[in-house]
Amino acid sequence: MRKTKFLGTKINPTRFHRSQLKYILIITPVALFMLLPLVYIFNYAFKPLEEMFYYPPRFLVEKFTLQNFVRLFSVTGTSGIPMSRYLFNSIIVTVLVIVTSVIFSTLAGYALSKLNFRGKKLMNEINTLALMFVGVAVMIPRYLIIEKLGLIDSFAIHVLPYLAIPVGLFLVKQFIDQIPNELLDASRIDGANEWQIYTKIILPLIKPAIATIVILSFQSVWNSADTSITYINNDSLKTFAFYMNSLTTNTNGVAGQGMAAAASLIMFLPNLIIFMVMQSKVMDTMAHSGIK
Amino acid sequence: MAVKPMKRKKRETLVAWSFLSIWVIGFLVFTMIPLFTSLYYSMSEVILDGEGIKVSFVWFENYKQVFSSPEGFNFLKSVSDFAIEIIFKVPIITVFAIIIAVMLNQKIKGRGFFRAIYFLPVIIASGPVINQLIYQGVATIPIIEEMGILSFINSTFTETLARPISNIFSELIVILWFSGVQILLFIAALQKIDKYTYEAAMIDGAGPWESFWKITIPALKSMVLVSVVFTIINLATFSENAAILHIKNNMFALETGFGFSSAIAWLYFIVLVIILGIFFLIFKLFNRERGRR
C-alpha cells in the first residue's frame, strides 16, 4: 500500500484509493482559489452595468445579461477597417511568434545547457541579468533602433522583438538541464551529430517546456496592443488586441467599463482554448519519454 | 575530400555559436543595445519633441534628482516597499510551489486535472484582472481579518515593515496565483527521481517523512534557485507594479522626462540584482551547511 504513495509514470491513476484522500482534501480547496480569476472573468462580462458598481462589490453575477456584448459590437471602429482584418493580423503574428520563438529558444537553450564552449557561462549570466530589466525602461531606445532599421510600419516588427525573449530561453534551459548527459553521450557514441541530438532527443524530451512556452508566448503576444500602438501607424497592420482596446477606450465612462469586461472575455477565450489544448502536454511527465 | 578533422572542443564551440547565433542577434538588437542606450540616457538630459530627440550628457544629475526630489522620494518608497514584499513573497511562493508539486506528483485520481487547474492562473494573471480581483476583496482570506492578524501586524511592527507585511496577508491568494510556473518546474524536477530510490530507502527502513527530506528535497534543490529567479522576475515585471508605474509615468512627464525615468529604471534594476544576490548567498550558505553535516 505504501508503494502507491510515491512516484508513478502514468499521469492519472485510474483507481481511487483511500490513501489518496489526505492529498485530495488539501488540494481541492486550494484548487478552488486557483479557479477564482476564471470565474471572475466570466461573471464580470455578463454583469449588467449597475451590478459592476455595487459597493461592496459582489463576485457573482445576479442578473445575467448580454448587454455588454451587444454594446461592444454595435460600436464600430473609427478606421473603417473590418474586424476580420485585425483578427487575421493577430492570428498570423501569433503563429509566427510562437513557431520562431520556440525554434530559436530551444536551439539556444540546448547550446547553453549541454554544449561546452567559450563564453557559455557569461552568456547564461547575461541572460539571467537581462531578465531583471523591466521592458518599459527600454521603450524609447528600442523605438529608436527600430526606426533606424526602417521597421516602423512593417509587419515584421510584430514578430522580431519577440524572437529573443530572455524568459523563454531561461525556462527552456532549465528543462534541458534536467536531461541526463549520459543520454546525449550515448547517442554521440552511436554517431549522432549535434543537430540530430537536438531534433531526435532534446526536442521530444522537452515537450512540456515547449508547451509552456507556447502558452506563455501566446498570452503575451495575443493580448498585447503595445506593438500596434508604438510602432505601427498604418491601421491595416494593427492587431485584434489593439482593436478591442480602441473600442473600449473610445467609449468613455460607465458603458465603457461594461464593454471592456466583454472585450476582455473575448480576448481571453483563445488563451483558454490554447491552454486546454496544450495543458495535457505541459502536465505530461518528462519521465514518459525515455528518462527512467 | 581531405578536410582536416577539427578538434572536438573547437567543433563544439562552432556548433554552439551557430545554434545561438540568431537568438544572440535578436537579443543584441532588441534587448542589449536598448539597455545600454538607456544607461546612457539615464546620465543625460533627454528632450523629446516633434522633431526628434535631443540628448545632452549630464553625468549623475538624474540620479541626484532621484534622491532629492519628491517624485524620486515616492519612487524610492515604492521600491523599498517592493523589496521588503519580495523578500517575504519569494519564500512563500517557493514553499507553496514545492508542497503543491509534491502533492500533485502523488498518485491521486484526477491528477492531470488538478495540475491543469494549478497552472491555469498563469494565463489569467494579467495586471487589470488581478487588480480588479484585489479590489473586489477576493484575494483575501476572510479568516485573516477576522482573527485580527492584520491589526496585530500593524501594532507590532514599525510602519515601514507593517505595510508590506499586511499587504502580503491581504494578497495571500494573489501570491498563490503567481506560482503556476514554479509548480511546473518542481514537478519536472520531481519526475527525475527514480521511484526505485524510494523503494530502496523504504527497504532500509526510511519512513515517508525521512524519504521526503533525504530524497525529495535534495532532488528539488537545483530548481529552488531557478524558481526564486523566476519569481523575482515575475513579480518585478508585473505591469501594475508601483515601481514600474513610476518609470512609465515619468517617461513623458514635463518636469522629469526620459532621462530621469531611465535613471529610476536602472536603480530599480540594481535593487533587483541585489535582491537576487541576497537569495543567491542564502542559497549558497544553506548548501554549504548541509554539505558539512
Image (tube, rainbow, N blue to C red):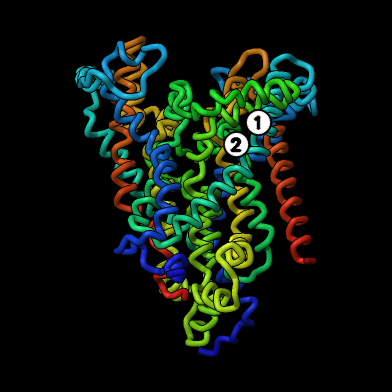
Q: Residue at x 46, y 74 (%)?
A: A291
Q: Which residue is mark 1?
A: B82
Label 1 element class: helix
Given residues B276 and B65, the one toward you in this image is B276
In front of the other: label 1 or label 2?
A: 1
Q: Say which quarter of the image contains residue B90.
A: top right
B164 to the left or right of A176 = right
Question: Along the polypeptide, which appears first: circle 1 or circle 2?
Answer: 1
Query: Residue at (49%, 79%) from the top-left corner?
Result: A193
In the depicted structure, whether residue B180 falls above or below residue B185: above
- Output the chain of dot 2: B
| Count of picture labels | 2
Q: Quadrant of residue A136?
A: top right
Provide residue B258's location: percent of width, then percent of height: 64, 24
Q: Is residue A234 left or right of residue B53?
A: left
Query: On the rendered image, what quadrant is the C terminus of chain B found in?
Result: bottom right
Q: CA distance from mark 1 to mark 2?
A: 8 Å
Q: Which mark is residue B236?
A: 2
> Callout 1: residue from which chain?
B
Vertical relation: B2 (above or below) B112: below
Instruction: Name which residue type carries label 2.
Output: Ala
**Residue that appears at 75% across and 23% down:** B158
Q: Amino acid at mark 1?
A: Phe
Q: Residues within 10 Å of mark 2 (few under 14, many from 20)?
A: many
Tag 1 and tag 2, C-beta contact below 8 Å: yes
- x, y (%) of residue B271? 72, 36
